[in-house]
Amino acid sequence: MAKIIVVDDDPSIQTLIRVNLEMQGYQALTANDGVEGYALIQQETPDLIILDVMMPNMDGYSVCQRVRKNPGLEHIPVLMLTALGVVEDKVKGFEVGADDYLVKPFDLSELQVRVRALLRRSGKLPKSAVSQEILSVGDITLIPENLEAKIKQHIVKLTPTEFEILNALLQNHHQAIALGKLLQEVWGYSPDDDVETIRVHVRHLRAKLEKVSDGKVYIETIYGGGYRLIPEGMVKDKR
């Protein structure tokens, strides 16, 4: 049974989400603000965090940042839940490490789809629903069990979303993947066709890979065409 922590200062929304999650067979725990929520996350180490943004004491962005900087928590997927729906707010959420973003008011069926997608990515659904196959091409080896990428001798820890993006790119290596297709493959649905969603995550993934790449670039931006993975890597253009 997956354990999910819901952090929201609105009692009615908190109860609505908790009851719905429990009806879906999940264990749901709740917190009323960011400080209480982060303490509960540290105590329980959940499989998923549903996190409101605008809260007293500590906002959701700050909580998400702390989760991503904590080595024992950094792997946990985070779904931001907020009334802020403009692109700039979404980008800020992704920049601090959120995996997905749901704008209030929302449909419960949409919440269910996103929760399941995040749990699938993090390997918290039954093994029959998630591929556990180790995939190795060129310099890159994906290790699903640990959500890791091995770049030659270097191990790179990935978030569930980064892992799924790299897996999709590796499955189609040397081929350009359009942003829309990548969104569909990774999310399992189209999150508002918001290309900024994928761009922020790809930027973070690219930075992690290049940190251990010995000067190589593995993810190439195809202008007007999305992204392409070069698993052998290519030397950066220094022009």
Image (cartoon, rainbow, N blue to C red):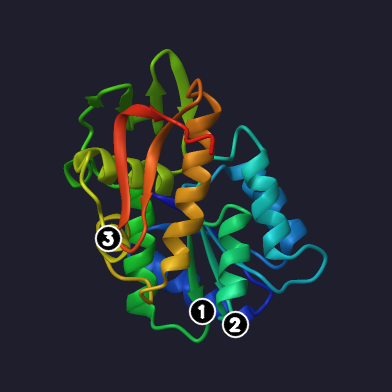
**Residue 178 disc label:** 3
The single residue placed furthest to the front in the displayed view is 239
| Three-letter residue code for mark 3 | Ala
Callout 2 touching callout 1 (CB < 8 Å):
yes
Instruction: Write the residue at 29% across / 66% down.
Output: 180
Residue 73 x %, y % = 59, 40
Identify the residue under disc 1: 103
Instruction: Write the residue at 53% across / 83% down.
Output: 104
Q: Nearer the viewer, residue 170 or 187?
A: 170
Identify the residue under disc 2: 83
Dot 3 or dot 1, earlier in sequence: 1
Residue 11 left/right relative to 62: left
Residue 93 x %, y % = 60, 63
Q: Nearer the viewer, residue 206 or 16?
A: 206
In this view of the protein, can residue 104 be seen by the observer?
yes
Neighbour class for label 3 at 10 Å: few (<14), some, many (≥20)? some
Q: Examine the image and state in which quarter residue 74 appears.
A: top right
At numbered mark 3, what does the secondary structure look like: helix, strand or loop? loop
Neighbour class for label 2 at 10 Å: few (<14), some, many (≥20)? some
